[in-house]
Image (cartoon, rainbow, N blue to C red):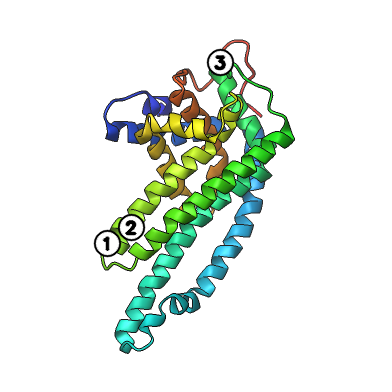
Amino acid sequence: MDVSSIARPVTGSLGRFLSGAGLLLRGLGLYVRSPGLMLLGVIPALISGVLFLGAFATLVWFVDDLAALVTPFADDWSGTVRSLARVIAGVAILGIGGLVGVLTFTAVTLVIGDPFYEKISERVEERYGGTPNAVEVPFWPSLRRSLADSARLVALSLLVGIPLFVAGFIPVVGQTVVPVIGAAVGGWFLAVELVGAPFYRRGMRLPQRRAILKADRPTALGFGVAVFLCFLIPLGAVLIMPAAVAGAALLARRSLGQSIDGPLSAPPSGTPAVEG
């Protein structure tokens, strides 16, 4: 299967959305051809995965108590109606917990694995001609900027999560429309978070990369939602994270009008192979 054809430029919002999702497949194709990078890329995601799996398991364990805590108004209701209200509250809590957890997992994993993911991102770009006008990115200043930007994105996701949590109480809508909106919101934040490294190499900060991704929002959403859904699969975040970093390098290049076309088997002349 020629995965490069999936990510070629197309027109129409739906087509661009699917093309963005195809960038994750293409990133996966690049990543699995790099055995050395595969191991390095999984280690930080595995560390974060253990931490966040434990945190989410704790949330599941206490979800009944939390549901009762946020629905004191239901204490005097009949048993069936009270139970239904608290089941809906529990689902809403787990949904928002999953949304925030995925975004926080990504931020923490990118910090833990910064040297590894930076190398993956750089090698993907080298394959397609390198980073035009690259700037020097010292480790500690880069880490501080990454922490600050990640904190801003997580805080914003919490602000968005509150109205989604409230909307989760609406019968039917809260269990159908709200999860779709949550995936779209989570996907957008993931796309903005994951393209951080290639934009930093070009001297661009969070406001710039957000503005550039907005110029082709369907493509960014397609990529981000695909990553978000993969992260919801057990162990999906651990296994997909490095491929998401590779796909994000392709998304950054496309958003900036730079080439991502070329053979998967060999890099351009004069650049090192993506073989770890």
Q: Which residue is mark 3?
A: 129
Residue 234 seen in the current view: no
Of mark 1 and mark 2, the one earlier in the sequence is 1
Q: Residues within 10 Å of mark 1 (few under 14, many from 20)?
A: few
Of mark 3 and mark 1, the one earlier in the sequence is 3
Q: Quadrant of residue 163?
A: bottom left
In the rendered image of this protein, does residue 185 appear above or below residue 250?
A: below
In the rendered image of this protein, does residue 239 appear above or below residue 138?
A: below
Quarter the N terminus occupies: top left
Of mark 3 and mark 2, the one earlier in the sequence is 3
What amino acid type is highlighted by mark number 1?
A: Val
Instruction: Label 2, secondary structure: give it.
Output: helix
Q: Are marks 3 and 2 in contact (CB under 8 Å)?
A: no
Left or right, 131 with reference to 9: right
Q: Residues within 10 Å of mark 3 (few under 14, many from 20)?
A: some
Give the camera-side residue of 75 and 191. 75
Left or right, 144 with reference to 124: right
In the picture, the disc for residue 65 is: none
Left or right, 174 with reference to 276: left
What amino acid type is highlighted by mark number 2?
A: Val
Q: Which residue is mark 1?
A: 173
Q: Quadrant of residue 217?
A: top left
Give the camera-side residue of 9 and 197. 197
